[in-house]
Structures are given as C-alpha cells and as structure tokens.
Amino acid sequence: MAQFTRVSGSVGLISLKNPPVNALSAVVRQGIVDTVQRALSDPKVKSVVICGQNGIFCGGADIKEFGTAMSGPPLVPMIHAIEAAEKPVVAAIEGLALGGGLELALGCHYRIAHSKARLGLPEVSLGLLPAAGGTQRLPRLIGVPAALDLITTGRHVTAAEALKLGIVDQVTDHNTVDAAVKFALSVREHSLNARRISNNLCPPPSDLDALFEGAMQKVRQTARGAVAPVACVQAVRAAATMPYTQGMEREKELMATLFTSGQARALQYCFFAQRAVGRWSMPSGARWDTSKPRPIHKAAVIGLGTMGRGITVALAQTGLSVVAVETQEKQLMEAKQAVSGMLKRGAKRRGVAPVLDLVSYNCNLQAVADADLVIEAVFEDMDLKKKVFQQLSAVCKPGTLLCTNTSALDIDHLASQTPNPELVVGMHFFAPAHVMKLLEVVYGSRSSPQVVATAMQLGKKMGKVSVAVGNCRGFVGNRMLKPYMEHAFFLLEDGATPELVDQALEEFGFAMGVFRMSDLSGLDVGWRVRKEDGLAHPGMALGQAARVRQGRRYSPLADLLCEQDRFGQKTGMGWYQYDKPGGRVSRPDPWLHSFLEEYRARHGLVARRIDHQEVLERCLYTMINEGFRILEDGIAAGPEDIDMIYVFGYGWPRHRGGPMFYAGMVGLERVLERLEHYHQAHPDVPYLQPCNLLRRLVASGSPPIHRWREVIKKVRSQL
Ligand code: NAI
C-alpha cells in the first residue's frame, strides 16, 4: 500500500509500504494512484515527495504477479498521471530504485538519491524490457549510448554514477526524505514543462545508424541467442527515432513478444531456482532452516595449484584469515606471487584495499593446526588425498571441518580415513575458483547437517551459488557431463567434425562447445581418469576391441589424441589447432580431419551427414536422461538444483533455464521418444536408455517442473 501525510505545511508525502523491497504489487499501485490523486486535489499541498518505507524506495514489479491475471491499476497510466501533475513531484530514493521502481522515479519531476542507493533497469535479466516507459524516458534523459548500456545489460549504478549520468538531480549523505521535502518546498513554484521527460527529445547521437548497428552486434555476440537484449536495443531505437507516444506503442509491442517467449519463463524460473537451492535438504531430513552453521574464523587450503590458488583468494576476499600450504618451496613461492596478484587485481576492480596480510604461506602441514576449516586441493589422486586426510586428522584441532575439492572421488572413502567422518564434506569449486559462481557442496553418508550448513554458508559468503548434492562418481555436474562428452565423440565417429558439433552447441547458447571446452580444460585430465578406471592404456585404442569397453560402446578418439601429446590449448593442439602452446584462438585442423577419416576407414565406419538437431538431441538428451537418474537416485533434491549447477558451473544458457527445465520446454514425451529412437539405433550405449523416472513422468501426463517432486518421491520410494 501507500501512505499519505502532509509535512512541512505544504508537502504531500507518499510512502510506499510492501516489505521487503516495496515491490509494485496491485495493492501498492492502487495505493499510489489514490494518494497521488489525494495530494493533487488537496489545495494545501503545493508539491509532493514519493519515498519508500524501511530505507528502500522500490525494488520494482512484484515478480510473484508475473504470469497471473493482471489486477489493479496498470503502471503506465499511473506513471503518466504523476508526470502530468501540475504540482512538482520529487522521488526520494533510498536503498534501491530498480525496474518499475526506477521507472516510477523517472515519471517524477525530480530525483534525490541517498549516496548508498543503487539504481537500475534489470528487466533484461528476466527476459523482459522496462515496459513502463523506461526504454522511452531513460534515453531522453541521459542520451542513447548510456541508456543502451544500462537497459541492455541490466546493470545497477551507484548514486554517484547516477548523478554523473544525469539520472538523479542531487545526492545526499543525510536523510533523503528530509532532503527531498526541503527540495520540494524550494521548487513548488517552478514550471514543470522541461521536467516532464516524455516531452523532451533524445539528445541526438552523432551517427544513429552506426550506433545502433554497433549495439545490436554487441548484444548478439554476448547474449548468445537471448531475445530480450535485442528487443531492448529495438525499443531504445524507437525512443531515438519516434515521437514519445509511438515509442510507447513500440515498447508495448516488443514487451508482448517477450512476455510470451519461453525465454522469459526460463529466466524467471532461474530467478526463483537460484533462491530455492539455498533452502537445501538431505535425505536424512536435515534442512537448511534447522541446521546451524559453525562459526569459521580461520581457514586453510592444502595444495596451491590452479584450484587452491583461486580458493585461497575467494576465502581471503570474505575477510577470513587463510593458511595456504604447498609442499614444494618453489611451488609455494610461485603460488604466493599468483595469489597476491589476484588479490591486488580484485581489490583494484572493487575499489578496496587488497587483503594480502590475511594469507600466510607455509610448506608444513602443521601450520593448519588451529584452522576451523581446511580445504584440500591436491592432485586428483585417491591415495594422495587419503594420505593428506590422515595427516590432517592428526594435525588439526578437534572439531575442524575437513573439506575436499575433488571433482569426482568418493567422499565417504575419504571420510573413512579420519576418526570424525561427520566433519568431512566436499566443497567442489569450479575453475577459476575465485570467479566461477558455482559451488557443489557434497555431503557423504556421514556428513553432519551442521557441517553441510557451514559449507553452504561459507559458499554464500564467497558470493557463490551453493548447491547441496549427494555423493556419487562426479556428483551432479561431472556425472552429467560424461554422457554429454561421450556422445560428442560418437558423433565424430559417425561423421561430424568438432567444428560442426561446437557450432550447434554454441548456437544453442553454450558459452563454449564441448570440443573447445575440452581443449581449454586439457584433454589429459579426462585421460588420466580413464586410465585409472582401466578404460585407456597405450595400445588399447588400436586393438580388436578398440571401440568397446566393459561391454559397451566406447570411443578411444580422445585417448588417441592424448597419445600424440595433443592436450588442447596448453600444447597448441587438440581438437583444434592454435597459433602456439597456450594460444587461445582456435582454428579447424586439417590434420584432425584426415585423422578422423583414417580412423573411420580403419574401423569400417561410414561417415554420414549429421545435422545440428541430431547433435543437440544426442548430446543434450543423454545429459538430461542422466539428470533424471540423478533425481531418481536422490543425489539432487530437485530439478532446480541440477539446473543451477549447469547454469552457474557449465555455461548452460540461462535463457534456456537449465537442462531439466529445457526438457520440460521441449516436452518430456518428445525427449522420451527421441531417446527411445536413438537407443534403438545404438543399443550398445546404455546412457540412451530412458530412465524410469522419465517414463513415470510421461505416464503421469508430463506435469510442470514444479510438480515433479511428487513423482520423484513415488519412484524413489519404490526403489
Ligand atoms: P594442480 O595440479 O594444478 O594442483 C595441485 C597442487 O597440489 C600442486 O601445486 C601440488 O604441488 C600440490 N600438492 C600435491 N601434493 C601435495 C601435498 N601433499 N600437500 C600440499 N600440496 C600438495 O591441480 P588442480 O587442477 O588445482 O586440482 C586440484 C583438485 O581440484 C583436484 O582434486 C581436482 O580434481 C580438483 N578440481 C580441479 C578443477 C580444475 O578445473 N582444474 C575443477 C574442480 C576441481
């Protein structure tokens, strides 16, 4: 709702009230309409201030109302009425003015912001555009280039930047409402014509066509198939080239197309799913709201390679003191230099002092004796990790949490090396660990809820999206990656090239196709694992049974490349060629193409034409099928957990909602039918066999994703 009072004799003060962020729900909109009318018809009121209660102006539309039937007064005429008022209206912006909140402020004649306020139009991140005049007023106020930047990226700006751009008229360090009331008193006699933004033209940019062409190119490159940023550019173009009323029509049209697009649904699903994964639960019944995290004051990291360095930086940036341990003196010195560099660069970006003193470096494991939590990040080698866990148990004070960053190894087996398995948990970071948003928190069969709660909370402090998952080979992310990659290799055997497969996946929206990703992370990583699993050793790839392992289809292509030291970017060649070892620009490699031809000829394989649809279906549906198995096994609590892991850790396009959401969009029946089709064609690939849960969901009429849990429960209870 909105409350009205008269202050300082002649100022009508309208205060929005809808905790926590004063979102513009139907009741709030009605409240604004009523109180504005009251203020305008009260002869004692000469000017008006609009503010929000509890230190927040307005967080924007009420996202809970999306997708429901519209009720209450619409935003556009409400903002129009404010702008058309004959009494000056001042927005007093504290805390946040986002989305519809900023559009409301743009309808006011003046804007005063507190120095700590943040402003922005983040609609694009929900697959929409600011459709209450935001795309038409902002460019008229601050010019096309700055408006394009804010609207197409959805980024928030500080009050200082807003003042510089001309979004606000004044910034105060003191009480914003008092300052706005004082300001309202001072402008009560002023003419308002020039203050009505919709009356003005956009400041003319020098070369309009070139500007919009550049903007369109930029969003097409970065948005990877997302439609909302493109519509945002089109709406701003309307502001620059059309009268205001026509521009508003265009804004409305574009919004209508976005509202019904699957992308907006996917992005809104992600918005809620990201919040839902924080409310974790374990099969034992332990939950986020009943498990209290332990206080952590001092952390330690063991092994300062690629991952350990990033983890050290992420921990120190939360303000924790960190002991960083590496056995070799030379490695330790290199790591110290690298960590300090990352901390300095991060601090510069955030405009704060680097926290170099929080990290101490040591070659001796004894140095971690008083840490509250230790994260092990030594080589992916079970024997080595077991030894480290045994040593840690002997060295650490009682009650220290022992965490491992293993990508796939058995948490229970590691926990069994310590006298307190309940204190052991996986904290699976993604490279680079101080940048990537995902953290898989892997609980073993004996991990205590308190320990899981502590790891989840620490993840949150580091700014990560933490997802609690059960213990199995590869956990959730890497377990699903295996069939995805395996299918990409099979596609090469069947006639595709790395370029074709990557192009299909990149056009789908992945940040990187599977082969480019494999070149970046290094082919040797998977090779080592396959060798340990007895799947690959020299000579095996050439023998009689080269394409069969353990009774199922196997592709030795990646092993053959590794045997030739083609490890990807680091060696300058892998699935692609690079100009030098460490080079980043990939080029198709004629050598690889003839190698594939020879390989097919040797194994009697006849190359056939593979199209993008087959690539997507075989790679993505097998991955999705494994996702259903993970749900069936209880390794992930719900589809949202899997989807957030893929969006934040594996470059899955957010506007497609994650693999499980995508399956629902495609239609579960269709996914099942295609899996059955491919399984018939390739009976030696068990990953293609549709899993029980998928069949049960289809048999239950393919319920929407938020109702899958009911079917999952039934399937699990029968296992
Ligand atoms: P790395 O090879 O870059 O670094 C491992 C470091 O551990 C080396 O600096 C080594 O000197 C040190 N080390 C070995 N034994 C030690 C001991 N006893 N005490 C102290 N330090 C010791 O390996 P990376 O890539 O950092 O991987 C570490 C762990 O993180 C592995 O378990 C890996 O599976 C996992 N991981 C790796 C990811 C990646 O993208 N590289 C992603 C997620 C997890």
Image (cartoon, helix red, strand yellow):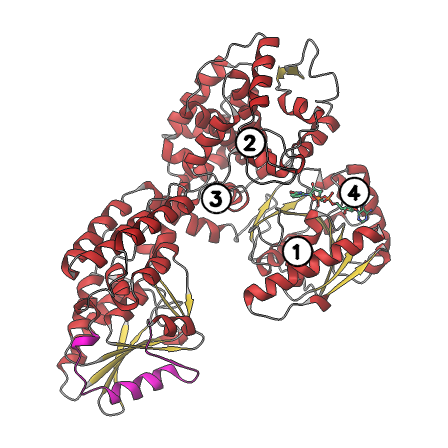
Quadrant of the rendered image holding ligand 1: top right
Residue 280 is left or right of residue 379, and the answer is left
Q: Which residue corresponds to mark 1?
A: 450
Mark drawn on residue 640: 3
Q: Is residue 264 magenta?
A: no
Residue at mark 1 to residue at mark 4: CA–CA distance = 23 Å
Residue at mark 1 to residue at mark 2: CA–CA distance = 40 Å
Q: Residue 476: x, y in percent?
A: 58, 38
CB at disc 4 and ligand 1 closer than 8 Å: yes
Quarter of the figure that contains the C terminus:
top right
* Secondary structure of residue under mark 4: helix
**Residue type for callout 1:** Gln
Q: Which residue corresponds to mark 4?
A: 385
Please state which of residues 626 and 134 is positioned toward the viewer in this rendering: 134
Please state which of residues 149 and 580 is positioned toward the viewer in this rendering: 580
Q: Is residue 673 above or below residue 629?
A: above
Task: Determine which quarter of the picture holds residue 521.
Answer: top right
Q: How packed is label 2: few (under 14 Cα within 10 Å), some, or many (20 or more)?
A: many
Task: Tell which tag, 4 or 2, sits nearer the viewer.
Answer: 2
